[in-house]
Amino acid sequence: MVGKKWYSSEDSAANILGFIMIAAGLAVTLSGADFAAFSFRTWRSFTELTGQVNGESLAKLARTFIILAVLFTTGAKMKGENALRFFAGFTVLFALSVIVRLISAEYEASRYLEWAFFALFIGLVVANTTGVPDFVKPAVQTEYYIKTGLVVMGFSVLFSNIVNFGLYGLAIAWGVTPVVIIFMWYFGRKVLKIDNDPFVITIASATSVCGTSAAIATAAASDAKKNDLSLAVSISIVFTVIMMVFEPVIIRASGLGELMGGALIGGTVDSTGAVTVAGTALGRLGQTTAVLVKSIQNILIGFIAFAVAVFFTSRKGGGKASASEIWTRLPKFILGFFAASLIASFIIQPVLGRPFVNSVNKLLDQYKNWAFVLAFTSIGLSTNFRELRAQASGGKPLVLYVVGQLFNIVLTFAVVYVALSGRFFPLPVIAQ
């Protein structure tokens, strides 16, 4: 559009807000001030829950709301939206997100389900019962929140993780992922005859990389519809919960061990948070290995999004993809993700040290998680059960995910066995 400001696109706003949060995290950590975001501690009873409600916690909750409301309302204004209308809707969305955080902090719930499940569930209940009030709808912007969160997440994706796990991690995280994507692409299109290419590539990326984060990036690169993304994310979340609970049980029963079991979890469980939980069930080594593999795999988000943008642009242009067409389709927030990762890996960490970067990320993760809760709740609020049922008719999307995930597990196990069984290569020494 002629005259459109460079900062008015959603990706530009996400990049700007993401780097404001990163810069603030660096400044606060350097100053030593306490600027942590509000979160509920795990609670088992109503008494434990109400015990968390005091002047300090309420002040922290208010501060978290003000920071997020100011940031995201400013971004909405940059995008040309009505700031007051966005702020009004955001207030309700944040309140729903607080309920999500409260429920997901309950002891039994937190043991088996991630907050993402509750965010999606609560949003779906509201959308398919009372409906979303019109004044709330301006703030229901899934991609906006998660893109901002992903830029912040880039600061925690350190290239030093590749060094820590070396070729073992590269083989497991990068060797398997492209093969799974290609397998699911051809299985979905040629065997299942699914004629929705953006959906196929979106669910393939979600399955093989890191669930929702990869789905968002790939959906943007392939120009997938909102319902394509909602269905892919819904399927991924359901099976992430199942795998998070049962994969560690199966690994322990099989005697696979913490090193190989953690690597298998890191390479096959979709969500980074779920990987941490599932790896912890194996032990300290299992958790460390799982997180390392998933962290290395997360670096692929940007590369996959770029490759998908080039591929879909080439197909649309009859095999010729001009640089301008690729640039138009490329999700620009991925550039922010890469930039944050490079700055953390090659500037901040060498100068200020890994402990400092860890401290910054501990603070940033709290705000990033709020952005993700807002995003998942928005997914639920914008999803209609009838539309999802129609889109999933015949069960082909479910078959695509299940077959693709089984292939992912088998191939990942094969690579993990070769790399980490000790039969073919010396075992790596991993600091725990």
Image (cartoon, rainbow, N blue to C red):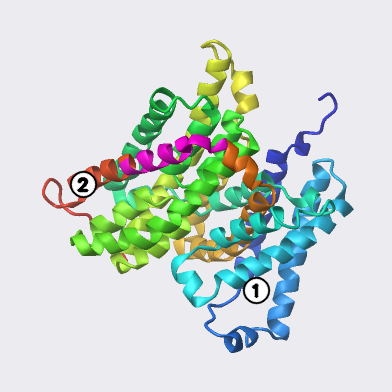
In this view, the residue farthest toward the left is 423
User: Callout 2, which amino acid?
Assistant: Ala
In the rendered image of this protein, does residue 248 appear above or below residue 157? below
Residue at 66 percent across and 47 percent down: it is: 142
* CA distance for labels 1 and 2: 44 Å
Q: Residue at x 43, y 43 (%)?
A: 207
Name the one closer to the observer, 370 or 26.
Answer: 370
Q: Position of residue 213 (x, y in %)?
A: 53, 46
* Bounds of the magenta segment: 391-406
Q: Which mark is residue 419?
A: 2
Q: What is the x, y in percent for residue 38? A: 65, 72
Asked if disc 1 and disc 2 are in contact, CB closer than 8 Å, the reply is no
| Tag 1 secondary structure | loop
Residue at image coords 36%, 49% = 268
**Circle 1: is it few (<14), some (14-19), or many (20+) Cα within 10 Å?**
few
Residue 256 location, x and y as percent?
A: 20, 58
Which residue is identified by label 1? 33
Q: Earlier in the sequence, mark 1 or mark 2?
A: 1
Q: Position of residue 98 (x, y in %)?
A: 67, 68
Quadrant that contains the C terminus? bottom left
Query: Is residue 83 toward the left or the right of residue 419 in the image?
Result: right
Label 2 Cα neighbours within 10 Å, binned few <14 / some 14-19 / many ≥20: many
Q: Nearer the viewer, mark 1 or mark 2?
A: 2
Task: Give the amino acid type for the residue marked by disc 1 in the picture.
Answer: Ala
Q: Front-most of 72 and 137?
A: 137
Q: Is residue 172 left or right of residue 358?
A: left
